Image (spheres, rainbow, N blue to C red):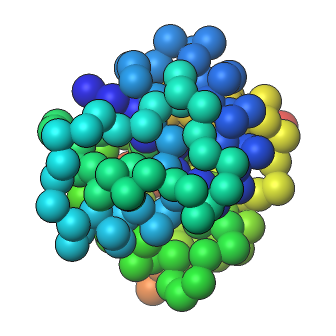
Amino acid sequence: MPTYLIASNEMMSRVLARRLHALDLPKPINCRTPQWLQTSAHAPTPAVPAQTATHKPPTVPSQTPAHAGAQLPHDPADIAVIDCSGLDGDPRAWLDQLHTRLAPRRWLVLSDRLDPALILHAALLGASGCLALPAAVELVCAATALVWAGGQCFPRMALSLGAGRSPAPSLLCATPPTTTG
């Protein structure tokens, strides 16, 4: 099963894709823009292979091959990292599209506006973690490695989500937090 890296920031995608190769994640690592999630829903699937991180991505958006946005996965993603930073509209809708299109086994949400509603929505959809941006590439890689290993990483505020109800069991640690975190 492939790995998907979905982000608008091309520079971050390139750096992160190189670092993720070192983590021995499932190959290929497919780099996509978030808009791919929308266009893939309406376009037919061509026989042309998808663009992967091993190929140099186009540097000019208008020169993107027509098939790059239309390729649907042949199987669900093993792991996906989606960056919701700077996206138009509600980031929860992007997460719904990711969940519908790729059905990743494990996935990490990155966002510059990580609010409790987004965290809760991601967790209820089955995300393995949420990370606030900006963050160092090393931190994103560490969170991705944790998610790949079957762990979860959510901000501390996730423990207090849903004031009127108890948080989902998957959001709670089995052991109480220590004084250092």
Percent across and percent down for residue 155 are 66, 55
* Left or right relative to 56: residue 5: left
Residue pictured at 67% horizontal, 56% vertical: 60
Residue 158 located left or right of residue 151: right
Q: Visible in this render: residue 2?
A: yes
Which residue is nearer to you in this view: 88 or 40? 40
Residue drawn at x 21%, y 72% is 42
Residue 180 shown left or right of residue 30 in the figure: right
Residue farthest along the front direction in this orientation: 63
Q: In the rendered image, is residue 126 in sight?
A: no
Question: Measured from the top left, where is residue 21 in percent x and y?
Answer: 57, 17
- Figure quadrant of the N terminus: top left
Task: Residue 2: name its quadrant.
Answer: top left
* Nearer the observer, 180 or 146: 146
Q: Quadrant of the C terminus?
A: top right
* Residue 90 percent coordinates (x, y): 51, 85
* Residue at position x 45%, y 85% in the image: 164
Quarter of the image where one finds residue 122: bottom left
